[in-house]
């Protein structure tokens, strides 16, 4: 997925500011696609240049004006074309810096690798807690946007996120145990 298509998809639900888009990213699809606010604004500018979105300045009392972006007919057409053009390879290539470090961890003391795996486990558990709270967010957005049929598909993406994160927690726990066992055996 490209960020531009994610933004077009979200704008197909309703018009939003860049800040609103960032909030939706963080609250709904962050478990499979993340974006920084600066990236969102850069892409919105590109989309506007291409004619895929239009913007309107909304004046606010006591606060800076904000731009509200809406998807255009041309943007809807681009998004539909992208949705219908599925790539040959559906599994994304993996680039995982932490796994490279684990692969070469024989160069480090086991205690250091255990420490890093414990950090990894803690982060994975925090992500899992976040995934479990997403069910309520899905309900909120589906009701707010009057999109009850979309909940099924949103939950399918969340299910994958939960399952992968549960596997990461289990993987890191098992690795920690194996390393601790190897330490004990080495000390004998």
Image (tube, rainbow, N blue to C red):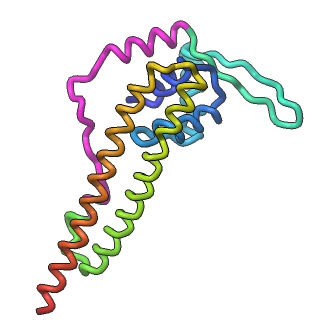
**Is 58 positioned to the left or the right of 20 in the image?**
right
Q: How many numbered circles are shown? A: 0
- Quarter of the picture holding the N terminus: top left
Residue drawn at x 41%, y 60% is 123
Residue drawn at x 39%, y 39% is 32
Confirm whether residue 32 shows in the render: yes
- Say which of 119 and 131 sits in front: 131
- Quarter of the picture holding the C terminus: bottom left
Q: Residue furthest right?
A: 62
**Is 98 positioned to the left or the right of 137 in the image?**
left
Tell whether position 161 is magenta: no
Q: How far across and down, in percent of the image, does residue 101 sit? A: 27, 64
Q: How far across and down, in percent of the image, does residue 94 sit? A: 26, 45
Q: Read off the magenta span.
A: 73-101
Confirm whether residue 42 shows in the render: no
Asked which quadrant contains residue 145, the reply is top right
**Is 38 positioned to the left or the right of 9 in the image?**
right
Q: How far across and down, in percent of the image, does residue 143 sit? A: 57, 25
Tell whether position 98 is magenta: yes
- Say which of 187 and 86 sits in front: 187
**Is 149 positioned to the left or the right of 58 in the image?**
left
Residue drawn at x 49%, y 36% is 28
Vertical relation: 63 (above or below) 164 = above
Q: How far across and down, in percent of the image, does residue 128 sit? A: 40, 52
Residue drawn at x 79%, y 30% is 65
- Say which of 49 and 148 sits in front: 148
Vertical relation: 78 (above or below) 165 = above
Asked which quadrant contains residue 5, the reply is top left
């Amino acid at each position: 997925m490209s960020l531009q298509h994610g933004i077009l998809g979200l704008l197909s639900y309703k018009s939003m500011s860049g800040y609103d888009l960032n909030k939706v990213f963080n609250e709904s699809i962050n478990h499979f696609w993340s974006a920084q606010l600066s990236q969102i604004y850069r892409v919105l500018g590109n989309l506007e240049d291409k004619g895929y979105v239009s913007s309107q300045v909304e004046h606010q009392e006591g606060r800076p004006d904000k731009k509200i972006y809406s998807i255009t007919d041309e943007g809807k057409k681009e998004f539909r074309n992208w949705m219908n053009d599925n790539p040959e390879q559906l599994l994304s290539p993996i680039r995982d810096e932490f796994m490279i470090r684990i692969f070469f961890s024989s160069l480090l003391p086991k205690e250091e690798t255990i420490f890093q795996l414990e950090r990894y486990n803690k982060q994975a558990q925090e992500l899992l807690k976040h995934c479990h709270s997403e069910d309520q967010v899905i309900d909120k957005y589906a009701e707010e946007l009057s999109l009850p049929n979309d909940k099924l598909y949103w939950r399918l993406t969340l299910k994958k996120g939960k399952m992968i994160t549960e596997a990461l927690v289990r993987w890191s726990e098992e690795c920690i145990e194996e390393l601790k066992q190897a330490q004990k055996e080495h000390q004998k």
